[in-house]
Image (cartoon, rainbow, N blue to C red):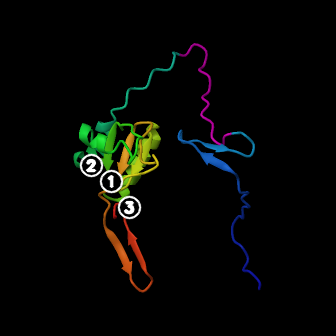
Amino acid sequence: MKLPPKKGRVFQLKPRLGILSNDGLCYDLEDGEDDFSEEEDPPEEGSPPPSEPEPLDLPGSLTEILGEEKVSVSEEIRDAHSGDKWFASHQPEVVVFAECVEDVSKVLAFAHRNRVPVTTRGAGIGYVGGCVPVEGGIVLSTARMNKIVAISPQDGVAVVQPGVI
């Protein structure tokens, strides 16, 4: 079998063993070097020292992006989203209730820009600590994403949003 000629450039990608860490950086486990460095250029001589960044108003910023009805700092809501079935527990700074894919994208883009940890939580409860926001930050609840998108009885397949139990 003869393949058609390739157009454009062809790249051979070498598979690499690595890990994406909680700090958002990718560490290459093959050569011990990280793929993305956070080093800053040293300040020029005579330049003023760098100023401290302004503290982030996490609830206020997220409310501005998503609307008041999707963001909660209520003690009761944060407690409900702080633990798993057994003993692990840590309260987040804010809980966001995503209602669509765009909400999820906005929250993750905001968190990435501001280096805020995000813990995603579905409609149920976890048993092994994966839903516990151990670093605080944002709990991104997908419980309101509870629509059935499609059902195919012939194929035995249901496509659902993550909040469907």
* Front position among marks 1 and 3: 3
Majority secondary structure in the magenta region: loop
- Amino acid bearing label 3: Pro
- Give the crowd class for mark 2: few <14, some 14-19, many >=20 residues within 10 Å: some
* Front position among marks 2 and 3: 3
Q: Which mark identifies residue 98?
A: 1
- Could you tell me how far apart the alpha carbons at marks 2 and 3 are, in whole angstroms? 17 Å
Give the labeled residue for mark 3.
Answer: 162
Query: In the image, what residue occupies the spot 35% across and 53% down?
Result: 103
- Amino acid bearing label 1: Ala
Q: Give the secondary structure at mark 1.
A: loop
Lower position in the chain sequence, tag 2 or tag 3: 2
Q: Which mark identifies residue 70?
A: 2
Q: Give the secondary structure at mark 2.
A: helix
Range covered by the magenta-colored residues: 34-47
Find out whether residue 77 is within the magenta segment: no
- Could you tell me how far apart the alpha carbons at marks 2 and 1 are, in whole angstroms? 7 Å
